[in-house]
Amino acid sequence: MQKTQTIILGAGLCGLSTAFHLRQDYLLLEKKSKVGGLAGSEVISGFLFDCTGHWLHIRNEKVRSLVASLMPNGFDTIARKAKIYLHGRMTDYPFQANLFGLRPQVLRECLRGAVEAALLRERIKKPALKSFLDYVRFHFGEGIAKFFIIPYNTKIFGVHPSEITSEWTQRFVPVPDIFQIIDGALGFSNEAMGYNATFMYPKEGGIQALSDAFFQRLDACRIMFRTAPSAISLKERFVEFGGERVKFDFLVSTIPLPELVMLTVDAPATIRSEARRLRSSPLRYINVALKVEKPLGGAHWIYVPEAHYPFYRVGSASNVSRGVALPGFSSLYVELANDRIVGEREALSALSAFLKEIGTIKDDKEIEFAVFREYTHGYVLYDRHCARARRKIIDFYRDNNIFCVGRYGGWQYGSMEDAIVEGMEVAWLIKQTG
Ligand SMILES: Cc1cc2nc3c(=O)[nH]c(=O)nc-3n(C[C@H](O)[C@H](O)[C@H](O)COP(=O)(O)OP(=O)(O)OC[C@H]3O[C@@H](n4cnc5c(N)ncnc54)[C@H](O)[C@@H]3O)c2cc1C
């Protein structure tokens, strides 16, 4: 049986970063025919589409210099233009900090709720916030929860915010204080708030360019495409694929955690039963080409919380980077809701109505094409079982020198930067131990 020190499963950013930092004695297995995973792009009739929107925001200086060395002068830095469309009004993102422009009754309900919540926070310093819903009500109040956060998140996760916890929110949900909320309601803009107020995007080639930049620095002989494991053994320490078995000392798995457990022939029953508890919402979206130059009033993306639209966000990569669409055209990505699954025809007719309503198109003929895409996993559901089940499984594998990392490998709500950092860290750990 052949042997390699480390086998890496999956050539998304996490697997690529692991391989890049290990440099030697690894084998990288990828089930698709190219690298990138979620951070990959596809070309459809001359238009370049990422997997919905993929904007790079970097906090870690090591990642910043790594990315700069991989792609010198390869990125534009862009100030986010994100909007919310509610009851026919367009307001700035984040909703909770930019209430100005909402219908008066809605604005009043949001503001009153926010003031009540602020008063409550004065009295209760250590609240027991079990669910995401508790968290939202406590920090933003009833109105903001009712008009934006509950409907929007129900669409993404496919379940009510009372079913999920708030452990993923810290970085992703901006929490303005009451003075910022009041300022935002009066029209003093809080537009630049939140983790992605500015972001980086490749000058050319879509987000695939970043994944390709890693790939170009790897030893091509160590990567096998269109290759997925059929079995993994902890005790005999092998990965089986294409009828062969290769032994390993370390395994780095970036493939979805439940799948890793299913493939592990000698996983204990307790771990299998924990894996059955892990839930996620799927990712369903539409790649659209339009015969208009600047859709969505120039916004990069628009949040659409109202339940009667079967999508929760509509974005335009060509509003960020002109080169992704053909001259005279533009592109959209439309992220479909998971609480009410509609067929393609209904989704398209709702999209067309929405685009007409906001003045992007006048006629359906301006929709050049629309291509639907679907992935099994989009967002991990942080329900009441998730933290415990995830911890048990990951610790179990860790004890066997198997590292479960990345967005679905580590079963978490992470960014591209997180995936790169985890790859860096796991490579360092292997080098220390190996
Ligand atoms: C809709 C959406 C939008 C996002 N937008 C942003 C954004 O704007 N900015 C940002 O920073 N982050 C964003 N993210 C998060 C970001 O995409 C991920 O955190 C990051 O790309 C994850 O990288 P990864 O390598 O962990 O996982 P993946 O990209 O999922 O890579 C896993 C790889 O494993 C392969 N694989 C799967 N199963 C097998 C198998 N059995 N055998 C072999 N290979 C297998 C897959 O083909 C894939 O290549 C977004 C995520 C989603 C879902």
Image (cartoon, rainbow, N blue to C red):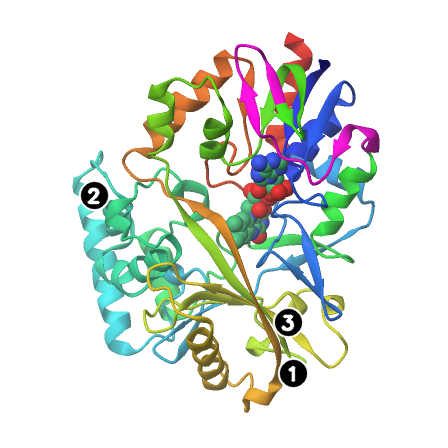
Note whether 344 is above or below 213 in the view shown. Answer: below
Q: Are marks 2 and 3 in contact (CB under 8 Å)?
A: no
Ligand 1 quadrant in view:
top right
- Residue 416: numbered disc: none
The foreground one among 322 and 276 is 276
Task: Say whether disc 2 or disc 1 marks the residue closer to the N-terminus.
Answer: 2
- Disc 3: CA contacts within 10 A as few (<14), some (14-19) or many (>=20): many
Task: Say whether disc 2 or disc 3 marks the residue closer to the N-terminus.
Answer: 2
- Disc 1: CA contacts within 10 A as few (<14), some (14-19) or many (>=20): some
- Residue wearing tag 2: 122
* Circle 2 SS class: helix
* Circle 3 SS class: strand
- Disc 2: CA contacts within 10 A as few (<14), some (14-19) or many (>=20): few
Query: Residue 260, percent across and down?
Result: 50, 29
Kindly identify the amino acid type of the residue bearing the numbered disc 3: Ser
Task: Say whether disc 1 or disc 3 marks the residue closer to the N-terminus.
Answer: 1
The magenta segment is 218-239
- Residue wearing tag 3: 331
Q: Nearer the viewer, mark 2 or mark 1?
A: 1
- Residue at 60%, 24% in the rendered image: 252
The foreground one among 133 and 46 is 46
- Residue wearing tag 1: 292
Residue 359 shows in the view: yes
- Residue at 40%, 40% in the rendered image: 168
* Circle 1 SS class: loop
Give residue 24's quadrant in the image: top right
Image quarter where the N terminus lies is top right
Give residue 312's quadrant in the image: bottom left
Note whether 127 is above or below 152 in the view shown. Answer: above
